[in-house]
Image (cartoon, grey):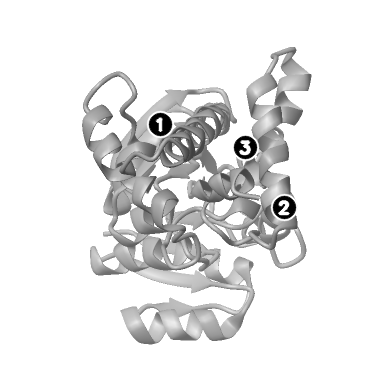
Amino acid sequence: MAKVSFIGLGVMGYPMAGYLQKAGHDVTVYNRTTAKAEKWAKEYGGSLADTPAKAAEGCDFVMACVGNDDDLRSVTTGENGAFHGLKSGAVFVDHTTASATVAKELAQAAADKGCGFVDAPVSGGQAGAENGQLAIMCGGSVKDFGAAEPIMDCYAKAIVHIGEEPGAGQVCKMVNQICIAGLVQGLAEGLEFANKAGLDGRKVVDAIKGGAAGSWQMENRFEWVLDGAYEDNKGFAVDWMRKDLGICLETAKEIGARLPVTALVDQFYADVQSMGGNRWDTSSLVMRLNK
């Protein structure tokens, strides 16, 4: 069992840190809102610290899952950031969906301290985190990945080492989000088309989900689309998706890739935000078609 800290107890980090504690690891948590950390410690029996640096002290592994690049820099290299408390030989594992640029920055900063770094964004949403069934895509050295994999396995159903280049995991997560964007828009259009044609949407999905049109989004989100259940379920918020797609589009400019459908769907999500759907699940794209 390892001494581990977890920084960031949002809808993803809270249950992920819980799985580490339940697995028998010695876990210390940090969260910007102290009450959330206190609640976690009471529920799972771990410890809490009042700064990321203190949370990281003496730890073999430091995991983080925060909001964006700026948040990540703040809790790592910022004042009282975790990197100020890292011991030599520790491995920092970043589960934030962030840019490949910040992953490279932090990998170098970790190396300068004699520490390892793995960028390890996750897919599976809040439900995946709560069920310990996340898909994790990783960038970093074989050595660092090999050390961190058994720790991440506590809350994962699949872990893949994408490459040794820092940021490889983040680029893979961009591919994930690009693919999802087109799928969700297609699902919205298809089911709205079926509705306008007077068909029973559930029967339509039952007929096509086993064929070439089938997807995880269809299997797991079609009822939310049909029932308009965007606020009542634990999915992936529109605000988060727009943040992720923004990273994808910015990276596409840097590497010379064209993402016409992704750019279009990003603007569709902007429309959903203007409707008050910032926290709706991404399957709420169908709402645009009902205006």
- Secondary structure beneath label 1: helix
Give the residue at x 69% y 30%.
Answer: 264
Give the residue at x 65% y 59%.
Answer: 278
| Residue 145 visible, this orientation | yes
Which quarter of the rendering shows the N terminus? bottom left
Q: Quadrant of residue 160?
A: top left
In the picture of the structure, the residue carrying the numbered disc 3 is 107
Tell me the number on the disc at residue 230. Answer: none
Q: Is residue 132 left or right of residue 33?
A: left
Q: Is residue 26 left or right of residue 271?
A: left
* Mark 1 vs 2, N-terminal side: 2
Amino acid type shown at disc 2:
Arg
The reply to whether discs 1 and 2 touch (Cβ–Cβ < 8 Å) is no
- Secondary structure beneath label 3: helix
Disc 2 from disc 3: Cα separation: 12 Å
Tell me the number on the disc at residue 143. Answer: 1
Disc 3 from disc 1: Cα separation: 13 Å
* Mark 3 vs 1, N-terminal side: 3
Q: Is residue 26 left or right of residue 255?
A: left
Eye-nearest disc, 2 or 3: 2
In the picture of the structure, the residue carrying the numbered disc 2 is 73
Q: Position of residue 123 (x, y in %)?
A: 43, 43
Give the residue at x 37% y 78%.
Answer: 46
Q: Position of residue 151 (x, y in %)?
A: 33, 50
Q: Quadrant of residue 219?
A: top left
Q: Quadrant of residue 185?
A: top right
Between 67 and 206, the one nearer to me in the picture? 206
